[in-house]
Image: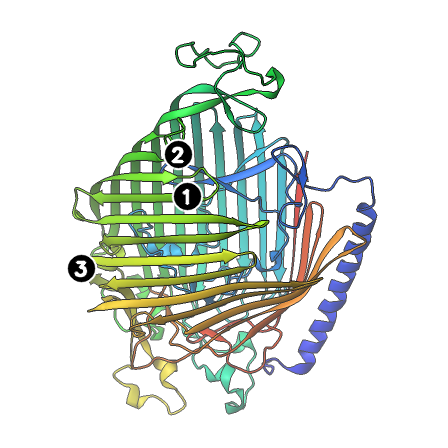
């Protein structure tokens, strides 16, 4: 039985039921929190260099003895990170729209998404040739963002998030386990499972992602490895037959509930199967040096004897370390550290990915073109991507002598790629490519005021010969009182071929082989940060900008269609890659501004962006996210955030979603529609107690105006109750 959209009585009943349920959960949680948090328990904290516990909301949630880091996928450089234990904005970690609401999405959890904020990180030579995975990057595990761990005791994290009910809601379960095998070796695994049922017909998504990782960090030899397995299945409904079901329900005698609104596709799916293997390791050459209690090098120190020699470390001869008169520093305040001089690095990346597009009812009239027929008039297309990359690098370490202020790397990379597509007889045909890339890097990572990194690389063989990438970043830290003024500048210049799938693609309903020109891109970005203020300015120019273009047409017999059918209900769709004929410029200004007044906190993320050609690069002129909340503690132990956030952006021709390629495409100019100028408001309560985080949220509380589209013909979810919990267990 159809019901009115956002009908008052049913919604009130459901909200009352969920509010009572949430109140009981919160009450029970508060009772446990107060009881458990009484004196006698040790608060979680991060142990500093001198063994003191650092206080503050940003670090007090980090368990003692736990450190995490990611690594540079090129060379295995260790990048320190904060463990995923920080409670702030935990309620937004499971949102498809992103933590700051900057992504457009077709619907519920697991749906494909696209950022409204242009960040310039398009496919580079080190990018992702398998472009079909990009809209799902937030649910796919990746070797690039693998967080390695070192922990004094095994750690287990269990997280569960849910929204809606068992008929149309979403569920997500994540599990992480990490442990050490000695002081230098760590290992673990992470599993992420989600299932989204969807509020509209044919909208369900499912995903299972698993990652196994391990590391060894010795003085001379270091190794990091990870294996990732991802499986996603996304049901495709092609959007609503008519937007008026949402925007103007008064037009219809029958009042449709979301699940009853007719959609364009009934039995279509996108599926991804991704397997990735990553290994990086290096061997360092160097010597040992005495370090005093303040981390300063000591030119003289105790003689190297068996009593001062570290187990397993070779004795250093007197020739390598001069030994003048004995130091006045007590032996007990000195330690011996390994100083790397050079390193040999090897990195291996192996990818085996497949993408399927399936439609068992393809005769429903959604597709504008068919390039060959399948048995039973169905669609079952597959493409395969295989890549093997080996990178060898030689590094001269920064700072092995006081006068060596810069580190340097020379590297060579070999890449083998294979792309498989069907031919006209539906037989898989593979195309193979071999590339050799040469490059160099200069970097300065030590020091308190000035850091920089400059890298250049060029492909010297293969069909993409002449591609190059030059990128760099510089940062300055100027101490002012008890804080510092931070100035950062980064940018790149790139000349590269569009991704293979922009040039070649074969399927039942989409087919092209195009000779596209190289894309030249130059980008410069500068940011200034002071306390709770961050201002960023960006300029980018793109020659031969490459993008997906949606194509729409009415059927030949459209004049014979019933008068009740709107153009949207009978429209036929196609998609094709396009290139802009001239240069496209982008100017972007963003401001991050936070305010604090006692327990009241106000966070803002504001972005202005303007493109020279909105027909090929559509972006909203203004995008805003604002979060107002109260931060306090209950019984001095239960950290509590109660607030609301809002997302808003101005109207623009938002990219459409194309099921045929599972990606976003620029709208057909003859049929395009503007979206935006609508706020999405969420209210929430976020709690944290020792090892546990917990939240409740009512998202899209202002539902009812009828203009809640982020993607053409794909309405967002209406008012939804959400909750989640994350618990860390330490042995």
Q: Is residue 1 left or right of residue 117?
A: right
Seen from the viewer's position, the closer of residues 163 and 614 is 614
Spatial CA distance of label 2 from label 1 is 27 Å
Mark 3 Cα-neighbour bin, 10 Å: few <14, some 14–19, many ≥20? some
Seen from the viewer's position, the closer of residues 214 and 39 is 39
State the image coordinates of residue 385 (x, y, percent, origin top left).
30, 48
Q: Is residue 7 above or below residue 699?
A: below
Seen from the viewer's position, the closer of residues 23 and 68 is 68
Tag 2 residue: 279
State the image coordinates of residue 79 (x, y, percent, origin top left).
47, 40
The residue depicted at 66 percent of the width and 66 percent of the height is 643
Spatial CA distance of label 1 from label 3 is 36 Å
**Which element type, helix, strand or loop, lies under badge 2?**
strand
Residue 699 in view of the camera:
no
Seen from the viewer's position, the closer of residues 687 and 387 is 687
Residue 479 in view of the camera:
yes
Q: Which mark is residue 517?
A: 3
Tag 1 residue: 451
State the image coordinates of residue 451 (x, y, percent, origin top left).
41, 43
């Amino acid at each position: 039985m159809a019901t009115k959209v956002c009908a008052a009585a049913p919604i009130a009943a459901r909200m009352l039921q969920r509010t009572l349920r949430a109140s009981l959960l919160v009450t029970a949680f508060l009772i446990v929190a107060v009881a458990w948090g009484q004196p006698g328990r040790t608060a979680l904290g991060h142990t500093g260099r001198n063994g003191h516990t650092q206080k503050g909301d940003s670090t007090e949630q980090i368990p003692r003895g736990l450190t995490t880091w990611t690594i540079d996928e090129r060379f295995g450089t260790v990048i320190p990170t904060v463990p995923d234990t920080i409670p702030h904005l935990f309620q937004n970690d499971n949102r498809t729209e992103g933590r700051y609401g900057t992504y457009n999405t077709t619907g519920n959890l697991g749906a494909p998404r696209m950022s409204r904020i242009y960040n310039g990180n398009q496919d580079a030579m080190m990018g992702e040739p398998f472009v079909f995975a990009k809209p799902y990057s937030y649910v796919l595990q990746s070797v690039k963002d693998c967080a390695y761990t070192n922990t004094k005791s095994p750690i287990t994290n269990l997280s569960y998030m849910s929204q809606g009910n068992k008929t149309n809601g979403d569920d997500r379960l994540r599990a992480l386990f990490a442990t050490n095998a000695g002081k230098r070796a760590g290992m673990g695994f992470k599993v992420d499972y989600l299932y989204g049922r969807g509020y509209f017909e044919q909208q369900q998504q499912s995903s299972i992602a698993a990652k196994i990782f391990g590391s060894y960090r010795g003085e001379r030899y270091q190794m990091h490895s990870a294996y990732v397995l991802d499986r996603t299945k996304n049901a495709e409904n092609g959007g609503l037959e008519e937007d008026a079901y949402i925007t103007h329900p008064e037009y219809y005698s029958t009042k449709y509930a979301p699940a009853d609104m007719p959609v364009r596709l009934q039995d279509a799916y996108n599926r991804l199967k991704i397997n990735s293997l990553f290994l990086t390791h290096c061997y360092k050459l160097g010597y040992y040096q005495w370090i005093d209690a303040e981390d300063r090098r000591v030119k003289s120190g105790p003689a190297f004897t068996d009593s001062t020699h570290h187990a397993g470390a070779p004795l250093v001869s007197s020739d390598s370390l001069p030994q003048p008169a004995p130091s006045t520093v007590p032996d007990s305040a000195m330690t011996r550290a390994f100083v790397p001089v050079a390193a040999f690095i090897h990195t291996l990346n192996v990818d085996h990915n497949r993408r399927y597009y399936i439609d068992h009812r393809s005769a429903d009239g959604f597709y504008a073109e068919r390039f060959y027929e399948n048995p039973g008039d169905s669609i079952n297309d597959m493409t395969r991507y295989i890549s093997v990359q080996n990178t060898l690098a030689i590094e001269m370490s920064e700072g092995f002598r006081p006068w060596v202020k810069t580190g340097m790397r020379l590297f060579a990379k070999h890449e083998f790629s294979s792309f498989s597509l069907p031919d006209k007889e539906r037989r898989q045909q593979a195309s193979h490519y071999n590339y050799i890339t040469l490059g160099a890097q200069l970097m300065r990572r030590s020091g308190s005021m000035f850091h920089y990194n400059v890298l250049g690389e060029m492909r010297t063989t293969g069909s993409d010969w002449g591609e190059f990438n030059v990128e760099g970043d510089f940062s300055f830290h100027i101490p002012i009182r008890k804080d510092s003024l931070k100035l950062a500048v980064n940018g790149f210049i790139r000349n590269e071929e569009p991704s293979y799938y922009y040039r070649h693609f074969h399927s039942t309903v989409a087919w092209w082989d195009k000779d596209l020109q190289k894309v030249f891109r130059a980008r410069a970005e500068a940011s200034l940060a002071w306390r709770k203020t961050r201002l960023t300015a960006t300029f980018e120019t793109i020659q031969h900008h490459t993008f997906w273009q949606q194509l729409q047409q009415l059927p030949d017999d459209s004049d014979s269609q019933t008068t009740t059918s709107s153009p949207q209900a009978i429209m036929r769709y196609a998609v094709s890659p396009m290139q802009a004929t001239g240069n496209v410029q982008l100017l972007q200004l963003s401001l991050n501004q936070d305010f604090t007044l006692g327990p009241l906190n106000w966070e803002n993320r504001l972005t202005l962006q303007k493109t020279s050609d909105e027909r090929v690069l559509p972006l909203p002129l203004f995008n805003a996210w604002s979060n107002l909340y109260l931060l306090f503690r209950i019984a001095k132990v239960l950290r509590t955030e109660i607030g609301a956030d809002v997302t808003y952006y101005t109207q623009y021709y938002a990219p459409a979603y194309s099921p045929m390629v599972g990606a976003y495409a620029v709208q057909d100019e003859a049929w395009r529609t503007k979206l935006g100028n609508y706020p999405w408001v969420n209210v929430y309560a976020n709690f944290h107690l020792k090892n546990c985080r917990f939240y409740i949220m009512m998202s899209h509380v202002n539902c009812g105006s009828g203009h809640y589209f982020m993607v053409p013909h794909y309405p967002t979810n209406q008012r939804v109750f959400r909750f989640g919990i994350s618990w860390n267990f330490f042995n």
